[in-house]
Image (cartoon, grey):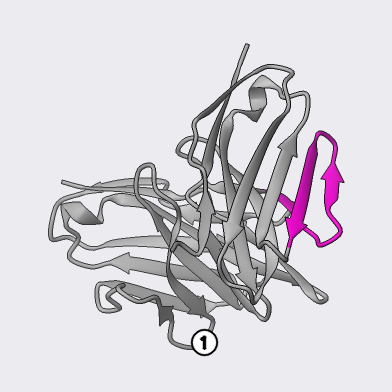
Amino acid sequence: GAVVSQHPSRVICKSGTSVKIECRSLDFQATTMFWYRQFPKQSLMLMATSNEGSKATYEQGVEKDKFLINHASLTLSTLTVTSAHPEDSSFYICSAIQIAGESYEQYFGPGTRLTVT
Amino acid sequence: RKEVEQDPGPFNVPEGATVAFNCTYSNSASQSFFWYRQDCRKEPKLLMSVYSSGNEDGRFTAQLNRASQYISLLIRDSKLSDSATYLCVVGVFGNEKLTFGTGTRLTIIP
């Protein structure tokens, strides 16, 4: 199956700093990538849809100025958590769509565990 | 009402038993249905897509009931390695965004 990587896998940062997370599709091109967040014992919550070459589309309640998304190429999307606070500590997971004919499959990256102290 | 609802469990099932999960969805425009598996502190991985006619993959069988808007997953001859959280996932045709249920936690007991 298709492979999606994320970097870093784990990051600990101090409150007020910014953290950048990279999501890469390794063996296919992805015009659309998604960013999710998962708090402990909760479901994945979609944060935003990242579109190559255009602005990201954010879900209701997600601050676009706090979670900056850049999808500069067909294989790379980045999520920057600006001025991180302890409540931003979470498991951030990206996914990329691989289209095959009229169907598609969504492949997930291994996730980035962010801890803000 | 949540868009995708699942019984969170936990389900503690002896090895070799058969276990079934159900999931209901609220958006009647939903066209894509999946079961994902998520291990602790890992990303979700696609277990199987769910088709209108139902589909089977080894010990796993998925069914879709559009009239009642629910999806089921049956696991036969359960193995210890089946222990995980099973996520019911629904998508709307033409829109690749997926909506995840909260997951059903399954533990297979030796």
Q: Position of residue B79 (x, y in %)?
A: 70, 22
Which quarter of the picture shows residue A80? bottom left
Nearer-the-camera pick, A77 or B103:
B103
Q: Is residue B92 above or below residue B48?
A: below
Q: Position of residue A114 (x, y in %)?
A: 31, 49
Height in image: B19 above or below A51? above
Q: Report the residue marked by disc 1.
A: A53
Q: Eyeballing the image, is A87 above or below B29? A: above
Question: Is B57 included in the stretch rendered in magenta?
Answer: yes
Question: Where residue B68 sits: x, y (%)?
Answer: 68, 61
Location of the C terminus of chain B (image quadrant): top right
Q: Please tell me which residue is depicted at 72% across the width and 24% down the height of the picture.
A: B78
Segment colored magenta: B47-65
What crowding class fits label 1: few (fewer than 14 Cα within 10 Å), some (14-19), or many (20 or more)? few
Dominant SS of magenta comes to strand
What residue is drawn where x is 17% and y is 60%? A17
In percent of width and height, residue A92 lies at: 40, 55
Question: Does B65 sit above or below residue B8?
Answer: below
Image-quadrant location for residue B52: bottom right
Which is more toward the observer, B104 or A102? B104
Left or right, residue A62 beside residue A75: left
In the figure, residue B18 lies in which quadrant? top right
Quadrant of the snapshot with the N terminus of chain B: bottom left
Chain where mark 1 sits: A
Secondary element type, mark 1: loop
**Horizontal side, residue B42 vs residue B20: left or right:** left
* Residue drawn 81% across the image and 33% down it: B59
Q: Amino acid at mark 1?
A: Gly
